[in-house]
Amino acid sequence: MPTPEDLTRELWKAVKSDRTTMLGLAGVDEAHTRPMTALTEGDHGPIWFFSSTQTELVQQVRQDSRAVATFADKGHKLFACIHGRLVLDNDRAVIERLWNPFIAAWYEGGKEDPTLALLRFDPEEAQIWRDGSSLMAGIKAILGVDPKQSYRDNVAEVRLS
């Protein structure tokens, strides 16, 4: 049975590996999440996102914006809903550190592109789920065992800050 700490480690490993995260502002009328490439350094926040000053998301970010990121790993074995703060943080040192050819492809002016925006997401808390639909869950159901009871160990609410 995984502990909340195990699920947290799995989450950071999966985000670092798979990177695609749905990101949006919380509490904004008609706010939508959008797919973004998450960049992490280590097994903790912040999570960095390169974007454009021309996007609705960047234009709506304020100094203390609440945000939500949802994540599903590529194998759909781990899912998470992460809440925290999102700020525009064009830290040149971080841009230099995270810059790579995949990011460069989006910015004609390179690191000096006037539309370049770097967002910093400081995660505070998350709910993490490990996939509960498995052959074993099916067998337990056939045998009359309530799979919801054993699945509880595959969900954790964790503090990330």
Image (tube, rainbow, N blue to C red):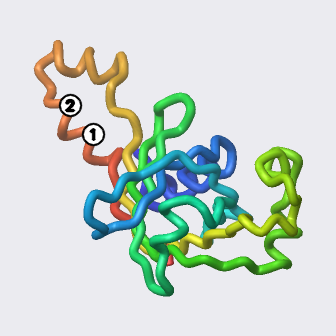
From this viewpoint, is residue 159 visible?
no
Q: Residue furthest bottom?
A: 63
Nearest the eye: 134 or 51: 51
Q: Is residue 38 above or below residue 135?
A: below
Q: Are marks 2 and 1 in contact (CB under 8 Å)?
A: yes
What mark, if any, has residue 136 been given in the picture?
none
Q: Residues within 10 Å of mark 1 (few under 14, many from 20)?
A: some
- Residue denoted by label 2: 147
Tell me the distance, in whole angstroms, between the alpha carbons under discs 2 and 1.
6 Å
Q: Residues within 10 Å of mark 2 (few under 14, many from 20)?
A: some
Which residue corresponds to the image point at 33% horizontal and 32% vertical from the top-left? Answer: 132
Residue kind at label 2, given as amino acid type: Pro
From this viewpoint, is residue 9 visible?
yes
Q: Quick one: SS at disc 2?
A: helix
Q: Is residue 76 left or right of residue 16?
A: left
Nearest the eye: 10 or 58: 58
Which residue corresponds to the image point at 51% horizontal and 74% vertical from the top-left? Answer: 86
Q: Is residue 67 above or below residue 75?
A: below
Which residue corresponds to the image point at 47% horizontal and 31% vertical from the top-left? Answer: 76
